[in-house]
Amino acid sequence: MKFKQEQPPINIGADISVKSFEMIEEELQTFPKAKEFDKNEIEVISRLIHTSTCFEQVLENICFTDNAIPRIQELLKAKAKIIVDVNMIKVGLSQFYLDTYDNEVICYISEKFTYERAEKNKTTRSYAAVVEAIKRHKDEPMILACGNAPTFIYAAINTLLDEGVDLKNVAFLLFPVGFVNVVESKDYGKRFCEQFDIPAVIMEGRFGSSTMTVATLHATYKLIKDYDGVTKYNGK
């Protein structure tokens, strides 16, 4: 039997992207849960679905604190440091956005001092890395973005408190994925952010990933120029 070669129905990158988001927008209309989010949150949700293809998991687990997106945008515009748990996030972020808003991405996970301090203090490298990052940049705006290591969340919160960091200059993106410490760490992060009115986007439960962290930041950057208030997705 002869195999017949085929070409993709849509073969231009930009066209593929446009079509993808059209399909996502159309399918979102079938989920009543989508109407609970404002326009900016839906933009982030669409990006998360685009990178994962998971509608229900994203809609049922995503959590935004009050006005999280515009508040995170203000930090980005104020040249916030983006402190991340893994280099995968650093590599994935758009250099265009980073250069436009002068945001430096900080990741000490592979530094020699991180290995040494983790071994000395009996912690994960992610824990040791974020402690050092916050100490070095505690007087600057910062966005703490976690896509893999839940111990990052514990270290970040505890160091912010221990160092007396001004929490008005802090935001969280919490997307670690896995089994051990994952659900508990996100709950700790959510309670902390609610207690101190810190803007945060959190993917609750076991679900998450570094790519979703990147997608959230890209959507938030894109909305800086597109932001037009908090109109509800259903038009109300």
Image (cartoon, rainbow, N blue to C red):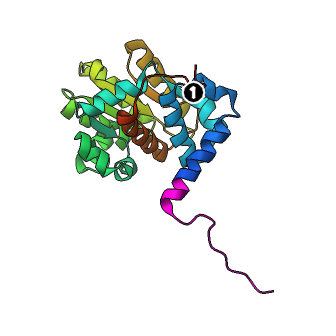
Q: Is residue 8 left or right of residue 127?
A: right
Is 77 on the left-hand or right-hand side of 11?
A: left
Q: Position of residue 5 (x, y in %)?
A: 68, 80
Q: Position of residue 135 (x, y in %)?
A: 21, 31
Mark 1 lies on residue:
233
Seen from this angle, which residue lies furthest top? 195
Magenta residue check for 15: yes
Residue 32 picture quarter: top right
- Name which residue lies at 37% across and 14% down: 196
Does 94 appear above or below 222? below
**Location of residue 162 with respect to 106 vertically, above or below:** above
Identify which residue is drawn at 49% across, 43% down.
212
Choose top left, top right, bottom left or bottom right for residue 205: top right
Point out the stretch of residues depicted in magenta.
Answer: 1-17
Residue situated furthest bottom in the rendering = 2
Residue located 39% across and 15% down the image: 197
- Residue 49, percent from left and from top: 57, 43
Prevailing secondary structure of the magenta residues: loop
Q: Position of residue 199 (x, y in %)?
A: 39, 23
Which residue does the image show at 23% across and 30% down from the upper left? 78
Q: Secondary structure at mark 1?
A: loop
**Mark 1: few/some/many CA within 10 Å (<14, 14-19, 20+):** some
Q: Quadrant of the C terminus?
A: top right
* 189 drawn magenta: no
Q: Give the amino acid type for the residue marked by disc 1 in the picture.
A: Tyr
Figure quadrant of the N terminus: bottom right
